[in-house]
Image (cartoon, grey):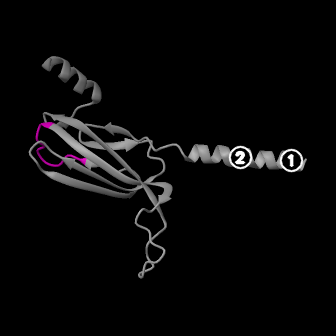
Amino acid sequence: MKFVYALSAMLTLLIGSVASAQAPDPVQRNNSRAVWFENWVGLENANMRVASPDGDIKDVFAATGTPVYELTGAASDGVYRYELRAQTDELVKNRNYSANSLEGQDEEFVPKAFYRSGVFVVRGGVILRPEEMEKEEEREE
């Protein structure tokens, strides 16, 4: 009977570690004036840096939850590019860690970094849906 309990405990730990080891996979969403991400599981301290077609760069930070980029005023038409950086809930070995640090503030393990880049298109002052972007690309070809 002890063997069954031990085996059950090991399987529970194994399944839990496999489930938590899945990498975050946020999905880009938008409406006519904002871009955000769904499936925001296991991420925090996110920064979304957006570069507009006219060269303006805006940072949007969210300690918890998804960062939301919103168009303001008269938005320039064209392709907007973004970089999304966040921390996962997974810890990894800190490459800069030194047990002999005089300050004693170095952490041996730090949150694993998450990075993604992408684009969205503004036409007529509104953000196009992905289907509309595909139609635009087909017209240009």
Q: Residues within 10 Å of mark 2 (few under 14, many from 20)?
A: few
Percent of width and height locating residue 50: 22, 48
Percent of width and height locating residue 36: 33, 44
Circle 2 is placed at which residue position?
12
* Rendered-image quadrant of the C terminus: top left
Residue 3 image label? 1
Q: Sequence order check: which comes first, mark 1 or mark 2?
A: 1
Identify whether 91 is placed above or below 82: below
Q: Secondary structure at mark 1?
A: helix
- Which quadrant would residue 106 be assigned to in this image? bottom left
Residue drawn at (83%, 48%), measured in percent from left and top? Answer: 5
Residue drawn at (21%, 42%), measured in percent from left and top? Answer: 81
Percent of width and height locating residue 10: 74, 48
| Left or right, 92 with reference to 127 | right
State yes or no: residue 74 in magenta: yes
Q: Secondary structure at mark 2?
A: helix
Q: Main secondary structure of the magenta part?
A: loop
- Name which residue type carries label 2: Thr
Percent of width and height locating residue 138: 19, 18
Give the residues in magenta: 70-78
Residue drawn at (46%, 69%), measured in percent from left and top? Answer: 107
Name the outermost residue toward the bottom.
102
Identify whether 104 is placed above or below 71: below
98 or 43: nearer the viewer: 98
- Name which residue type carries label 1: Phe
Residue 43 image label? none
Mark 1, mark 2: which one is toward the viewer?
Answer: 1
